[in-house]
């Protein structure tokens, strides 16, 4: 399916603000955050430290009286320079620093909800430094279209007693946000990503890409906000 058609399908599947976190959170509890390489204030933070980064997020939320900071689709970030998982190449165009999902920064153990009806496709604890940590992938089928949603940086308890193929309903709790000790060493957050072609991967899929591969991944992983419909202002 072409990029435009896939995006249009996603847009039709929800009619307004759609929750991916705790059912008690309202749209007005969310605020956009800029974590790009252009954020001068972020440049003053030791982003290699999950504690320092958590403090930065907490101060940002407190300043605006909000509960969830979100954003990051196609955002170019310096954050990934701390991990060899993203910077193994000497070729700058091959190093991965462009984010492919939406991040939702909130308190650890915040509930994570299925955004659409579907079934559990797979799950895994991706334990590399800077990786997703516990991750769940759901499979969805609408109008003869099959695609996937990925939920990363969960708690380890989120993976207990899961069985591939188990149906899930839109709005159903599927896990909780993990702590830095279990989520790949990040401030607590959800990485939420839409994927058209999963390429036979199990419980994992690239959430950050390089400039070299950007066009392919932006087509395969459209903006999740087509579904969530959060205001960007």
Image (cartoon, rainbow, N blue to C red):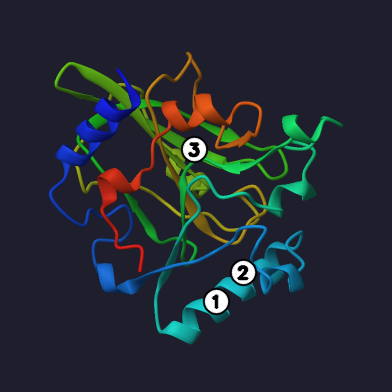
Question: Residue 16 shows which numbered tag?
Answer: none
Q: Which residue is mark 1?
A: 58
Q: Within the image, what quadrant is residue 163 found in?
A: top left
Taking the spot 69% from the left edge, 71% from the top edge, the residue there is 40
Q: Residues within 10 Å of mark 1 (few under 14, many from 20)?
A: some
Mark found first going from the N terminus, 2 or 3 = 2
Residue 180 seen in this snapshot: yes
Q: In the orientation shown, which residue stands out farthest toward the right?
A: 90
Taking the spot 67% from the left edge, 53% from the top edge, the residue there is 185
Do labels 1 and 2 touch, CB within 8 Å? yes
- Whether 33 is drawn above or below 127: the answer is below
Q: Which residue is mark 3?
A: 135
Taking the spot 50% from the left edge, 53% from the top edge, the residue there is 72
List x then y, in percent, for residue 101: 47, 43
Number of marks: 3
Give the secondary structure at mark 2. Answer: helix
- Which quarter of the figure is the C terminus placed in? bottom left
Circle nearer the viewer, 1 or 3: 1
Q: Residues within 10 Å of mark 2 (few under 14, many from 20)?
A: many
Viewer-proximal residue, 53 or 44? 44
- Whether 188 is drawn above or below 149: the answer is below
- Which quarter of the figure is the N terminus placed in? top left
Q: Which residue is mark 2?
A: 54
Taking the spot 49% from the left edge, 86% from the top edge, the residue there is 63
Do labels 2 and 3 touch, CB within 8 Å? no
List x then y, in percent, for residue 97: 67, 43
List x then y, in percent, for residue 125: 57, 35
């Amino acid at each position: 399916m072409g990029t435009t058609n896939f995006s249009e399908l996603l847009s039709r599947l929800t009619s307004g603000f759609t929750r991916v976190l705790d059912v008690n959170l309202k749209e007005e509890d969310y605020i956009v955050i800029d974590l790009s390489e252009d954020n001068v204030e972020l440049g003053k933070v030791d982003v290699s430290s999950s504690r320092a980064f958590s403090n930065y997020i907490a101060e940002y939320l407190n300043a605006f009286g909000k509960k969830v900071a979100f954003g990051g689709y196609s955002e170019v970030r310096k954050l990934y320079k701390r991990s060899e998982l993203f910077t193994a190449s000497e070729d700058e165009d091959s190093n991965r620093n462009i984010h492919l999902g939406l991040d939702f920064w909130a308190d650890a153990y915040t509930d994570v909800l299925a955004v659409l009806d579907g079934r559990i496709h797979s799950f895994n604890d991706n334990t590399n430094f800077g990786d997703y940590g516990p991750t769940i992938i759901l499979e969805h089928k609408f109008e003869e279209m099959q695609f996937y949603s990925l939920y990363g940086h969960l708690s380890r308890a989120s993976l207990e007693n899961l069985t591939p193929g188990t149906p899930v309903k839109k709005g159903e709790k599927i896990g909780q946000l993990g702590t830095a000790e279990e989520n790949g060493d990040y401030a607590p957050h959800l990485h939420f990503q839409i994927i058209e072609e999963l390429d036979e991967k199990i419980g994992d899929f690239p959430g950050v890409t390089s400039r070299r591969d950007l066009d392919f991944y932006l087509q395969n992983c459209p903006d999740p906000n087509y579904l969530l419909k959060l205001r960007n202002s």
